[in-house]
Image (cartoon, rainbow, N blue to C red):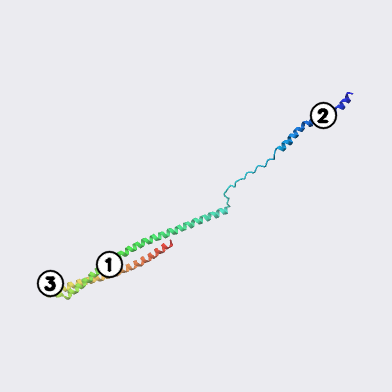
Amino acid sequence: MRRILLIVSAPVIAIAIISSAGKAQEPVRQDLHSTARQTKPLKPAPEPVDKPIQTTPILEPNDQMARAITSLSTQISVLTDELKKLRRETERNAGMMELLLNEDRLARVEDKIQAAHDYKAQLDAREQDFLRRQKNIQVEVVMRGGLRRDEAEAAIRAELQRGLEDTRNQQLTYQQRITELNEQATKLRARIEKLKKKMEGVDEEK
């Protein structure tokens, strides 16, 4: 009898346990559903935007060589221009110095020419004086006096002749000197003119 009761009551007890377990789980499910309804879905956070980082491009060896050659060529061109400018300045300074020296030489030569002409004019006047005195030899004899007129006249004629010859020799010397000085002056004037034109050309190149 007791065995039959156990067999009959076992299913009832199992049903009761299952029923109470289901009731106990219902609030949890309700809470989960309510929590799911109350919680709004979160938007995914935007990914951080990385700022572009400026980096120096890595050049190939050929590119590096090309850039080095270009830079060197530019430097050579600048240096060449500077050398040309320096050469023009040097030529201009040298030309100016030579021009000043030649102008100074020309001035001194012209002074010598003028002095030679002045002295030559004095020689010409002296020659004319000797010629005049030779024509008036008798006046010379009277002015000097003397016991022997013939001897005195001969001595005076010889003296005047020597003075005349010496004067004419000096005239020839100074005439030749004037000719040489004029040639020097002509060459110097030509050189000065050439230097002036050269200087004008250098100034125009600037």
As measured in the structure, the alpha-carbon distance from the residue carrying label 3 to the one carrying label 1 is 37 Å
Q: Which residue is mark 3?
A: 143
- Viewer-side label of 2, 1: 2
Local crowd size for mark 3, using a 10 Å CA cut-off: few (<14), some (14–19), many (≥20): few
For residue 70, side relative to residue 20 (left or right): left
Q: Quadrant of residue 82?
A: bottom left
For the N terminus, which image quadrant? top right
For residue 158, side relative to residue 183 (left or right): left
For the C terminus, which image quadrant? bottom left
Instruction: Tell me where residue 194 appears, x and y as whole percent.
Output: 38, 66
Q: Which residue is mark 1?
A: 114
Residue 153, compared with residue 14, is above or below; it is below
Instruction: Tell me where residue 189 appears, x and y as whole percent.
Output: 34, 67
Residue 150, compared with residue 18, is above or below; it is below
Q: Which residue is mark 2?
A: 16
Local crowd size for mark 2, using a 10 Å CA cut-off: few (<14), some (14–19), many (≥20): few
Pick out the residue farthest to the left: 147
